[in-house]
Amino acid sequence: MQPPATFPKLDPALCTACGACEVACVTARYPAAPAGISPDDPLVLERRRLAIRVIADVPSLDLCVHCPDSPCVSVCPHNALVRFPGGRVELIEPRCTGCGHCIAACPYKAIRRVTELGIAVKCDGCAPMDKPGHVVAIAGGPACVAACPTAALRV
């Protein structure tokens, strides 16, 4: 089995909320995305799997924290969210119908709906799965970390 995905961590003191991480998130997942897209491009706003929020001038990263009780897992009627041994919560996209129960249940706002695709998505550390529970990592780790110009994101 492949090593588990690594998830980005944010140093808010270094973050400028430039959006480079969100663009990298989308372009890593959707190679057909046009070169030079900006953070406010509708494609980025719609399909990003992580997001920087700025509250009271302090940036925060909306990421799954793999809650021990995983409220998103318990409310999913299609078993699209699964907790695996070791605590990792994975979203099995082919099972997702986009009903939104997990989005409402997530206390960290780490799950969002991609209207165009009709499914929910969440950050998976740039580790797509070839089958549920079997992680096939993207070389280099999370794309957002490599794209951050201030090194505010790290693994």
Image: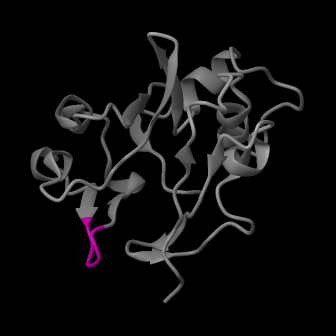
Q: Which is nearer the eye, 135 or 66?
A: 66
Q: Which colour style is shown?
A: one colour
Instruction: Report whether residue 77 is seen.
Output: no
Name the residue at 54% across, 27% down. Answer: 52
Name the residue at 53% across, 64% down. Answer: 6
Name the residue at 78% across, 35% down. Answer: 33
**Residue 86 is a magenta residue:** yes
Please say if 113 is above or below 138: above
Name the residue at 54% across, 84% down. Answer: 2
> Of helix, strand and loop, which mostly describes the magenta segment?
loop
Q: Furthest residue to the top?
A: 56
Q: Is residue 28 left or right of residue 4?
A: right
Q: Furthest residue to the right?
A: 35
**Residue 141 is a magenta residue:** no
Q: Is residue 93 left or right of residue 152?
A: left
Question: Can you give x and y, in whole percent of width and height, for residue 43 in the image?
Answer: 66, 24
Q: Which is nearer the eye, 10 or 6?
A: 10
Question: Can you give x and y, in whole percent of width and height, for residue 38 in the image?
Answer: 78, 20
Please say if 5 is above or below 125: below
Number of dots carrying numbers: 0
Q: Which residues are magenta?
A: 83-87
Please say if 98 is above or below 53: below
